[in-house]
Image (cartoon, helix red, strand yellow):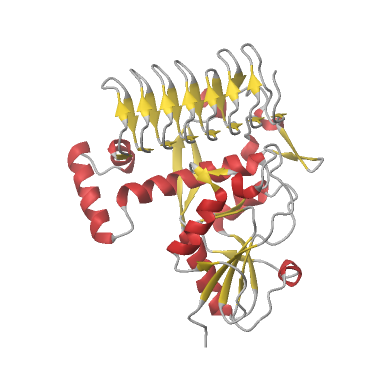
Amino acid sequence: MASARLRGLLLPAVSVVEGLGVSPGEAPWLGRPLAIRQERAFRLAGVEPGPDDPEADRVVLAADAVATPATVLGILRQGRARGTPTSFVPGGELGVLAAALWLGREGVLAAFVPAGVPMDPEALAALEPDPLDPGEQSLDVPVPASTFGAAKLTVPLADRILLPAGHWVQVLWANLLGLGPFLWKEFLGANAAVMVWRIARAALRARSVEPARLSAIMGRRGRGTHVHPSAVVEGSWLGEGVEVGAQAVVRGAILAAGARVEDLALVEYAVVGPAAVVHRQAQVTFSVLDARAACAGAVRLGLLGTGAAIREGATLMDTSALDRIPVEAAGTRHPAPLGLAGACVGPRSVVRGGVRIPPGAVVPADTIL
């Protein structure tokens, strides 16, 4: 019989995040460090994080594993059904995309160890992983046809996110794939009654039940947030003290506490970290800005580390050869997931005006270009 005791374990980090030079726990995921999100996933799933307890059923996550509370519950459910130590990788369409994100990664990503069985990472790594049911549906995201070759990009919208984040490209895609489920759950809530009420209220405001129309008018604004009356903010999560300037446009985004989007700036389908700034007329799309990063140029499918800066006129969105973008991981070149990758600017680095960073490139930490 399965034990009622539950314990969440994090495996020690074996390396830093390639391209960012920080530990996996410091990597940005949905506006917070990954370590905080991992602990929250355990606790919201009713699992106590801490040291190994051989008398408890255990959910094991790698230090670079991106996981939601639903992921932890899914691992518990599938693992207990088997009753034996089980290693997991993402399944479904999310798993297909995750395979392109693996970039040669080795070792356990997530696992279940039942009570009474010794915890042995090497033994878990030797197991044939089970695909974790992601509980997903496809989402069509409108994109510029001139850049992507089509008017929409179909991505899996999964509640059980399970992805690696040991490389900057993995961090970028983990944020982009986690953005939709995070916003949808934040806006609608996990409680069925609350969900029905919020959908009904949004439908009345939108005069439509189309998902795209409903999501456009939904949103969250934290305390002390100021949005200029002429700004357009649709389907976005705004943290405490966020500022959005005149005629700025923010769609499908997370703006963490203290973030600022200045006049005439554009932020679409992006995560802007705490105290980060998108300057006047800058563009940030399908990208991630870590804490205190600043963008005054144009970034698409890019990642800016903590305190990194893109000056006016600088560009991280060269898309002249999308089908040939190489991504280097551990000294080996891999094709970019879906052929899409911007560039990474490491912590505290500065890219000055007029500089174009090619796709797949990395600007190391503490560099000025």
Q: Is residue 31 visible?
A: yes
Taking the spot 54% from the left edge, 78% from the top edge, the residue there is 80
Where does the image place residue 157, in percent across and percent down from the top left? 46, 49
Residue 218 position, x and y percent, is 29, 40
Q: How many marks on residues?
A: 0
Residue placed farthest to the bottom in the image?
1
Question: What residue appears at the point 60 percent right and 55 percent down from the top-left corner?
Answer: 95
Residue nearest the viewer, comparing 146 with 106: 106
Task: Report the residue at 69% width, 23% height from top.
Answer: 358
Residue 298: % across, % down: 54, 20
Residue nearer the viewer, 118 or 87: 118
Q: Quadrant of the C terminus?
A: top right
In the rendered view, tell whether residue 306 sits above or below residue 199: above
Which quarter of the figure has residue 119? bottom right
Taking the spot 35% from the left edge, 48% from the top edge, the residue there is: 186
Above or below, 208 relative to 38: above
Residue farthest to the left?
A: 204
Query: Where is residue 111, by image quadrant?
Result: bottom right
Q: Is residue 123 above or below residue 198?
A: below
Near-viewer residue (167 or 181) = 167
Note whether residue 144 is visible. no
Q: Position of residue 333 (x, y in %)?
A: 78, 39
Query: Horizontally, is 306 left or right of 107 in the view?
Result: left
